[in-house]
């Protein structure tokens, strides 16, 4: 982890030329869709918890039990935090089914509706870093628990940056456990043809940071969009910023780390 530095005056910095690939989470890292997810989860759980006479849903529940995880895992973990047990159901369950999968599908339906109605744009700081990495020839991939990642990338107009997208559907097809296991990040590095030790993981969720820390990755960067720097550091982040624009620097001349 020696290729980073920080000071109270200048803040954190990263020598991007030391790495061959950067593996990004999507929601809350590249696009502000984490906010859309957050609202959709609240809309789902508030009436469900009230119906079961459980403690009301809060924003902290999102960060503690849902953020960054595969959708059904998030449902299962939140319900477990309230001592609520529901049948597992199947991914084919309708959005009105009172099952783990049914609730997850209900949330997904609400998210997609919000995305279509409001659209989404990348964070300016994230876009600036992506452009710098592209110009330097650094390989990039998206690793997202959401099956909707390709649609979000397309809506945000940033598909071109990411030749590899490992989303929730890919993980299921290939039998890969979701975050906080490191497997989806390892798969993205493999598909890029890059060793884990030459890749950086960028995450905003503790579960995703833990996934990066559990692997043999060179650096794990936490982006604090509300989770809290202390929580991200405790989960295993080496560097924490509030916006990826903080890590954009002058582009070294003649740098091309994307081959080989």
Image: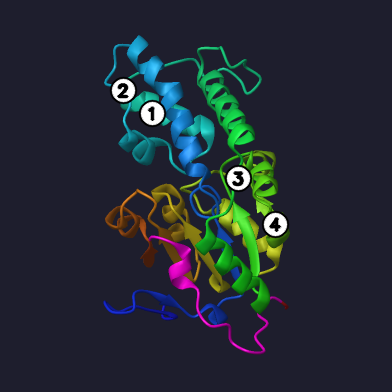
Label disc, if present, on residue 78 of the rendered structure: 1
* Mark found first going from the N terminus, 3 or 4: 4
- Residue 35 placed where, x, y %? 46, 41
Q: Are marks 3 and 2 in contact (CB under 8 Å)?
A: no
Residue 159: % across, % down: 70, 54
Residue 45 disc label: none
Provide the residue designation for mark 2.
Answer: 82
Q: Earlier in the sequence, mark 2 or mark 4?
A: 2
Determine the CA span between mark 1 and mark 3.
22 Å
Q: Which mark is residue 176?
A: 3
Alpha carbon separation for disc pair 2 and 1: 7 Å
Report crowding for label 3: few under 14, some 14 to 19, many 20 or more residues within 10 A (C-alpha).
Answer: some
Task: Give the residue drawn at x 35%, y 48%.
Answer: 226
Q: Is residue 98 magenta?
A: no
Which span is picked out in magenta?
242-258
Considering only vertical position in the picture, is 232 above or below 42? below
Give above or below for 221 relative to 154: below
In contact (CB < 8 Å): disc 2 and disc 1 = yes
């Amino acid at each position: 982890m020696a290729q980073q530095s920080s000071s109270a005056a200048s803040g954190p910095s990263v020598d991007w030329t030391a790495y061959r690939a950067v593996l990004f989470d999507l929601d809350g890292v590249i696009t502000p869709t984490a906010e859309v997810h957050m609202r959709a989860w609240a809309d789902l759980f508030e009436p469900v918890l009230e119906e079961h006479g459980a403690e009301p849903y809060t924003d902290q529940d999102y960060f503690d039990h849902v953020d960054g995880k595969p959708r059904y895992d998030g449902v299962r973990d939140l319900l477990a935090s309230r001592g609520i047990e529901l049948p597992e159901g199947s991914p084919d369950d309708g959005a009105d089914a009172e099952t783990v999968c049914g609730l997850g599908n209900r949330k997904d339906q609400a998210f997609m509706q919000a995305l279509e109605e409001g659209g989404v744009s990348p964070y300016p700081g994230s876009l600036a870093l992506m452009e710098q990495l592209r110009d330097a020839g650094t390989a990039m991939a998206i690793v997202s628990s959401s099956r909707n990642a390709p649609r979000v990338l397309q809506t945000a107009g940033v598909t071109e940056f990411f030749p590899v997208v490992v989303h929730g559907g890919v993980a299921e097809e290939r039998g890969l456990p979701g975050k906080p296991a490191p497997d989806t990040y390892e798969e993205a590095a493999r598909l890029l043809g890059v060793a884990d030790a030459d890749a950086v993981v960028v995450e905003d969720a503790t579960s995703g940071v833990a996934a990066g820390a559990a692997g043999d990755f060179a650096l794990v960067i936490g982006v604090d969009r509300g989770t809290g720097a202390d929580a991200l550091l405790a989960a295993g982040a080496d560097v924490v910023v509030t916006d990826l624009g903080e890590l954009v620097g002058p582009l070294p001349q003649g740098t091309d780390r994307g081959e080989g």
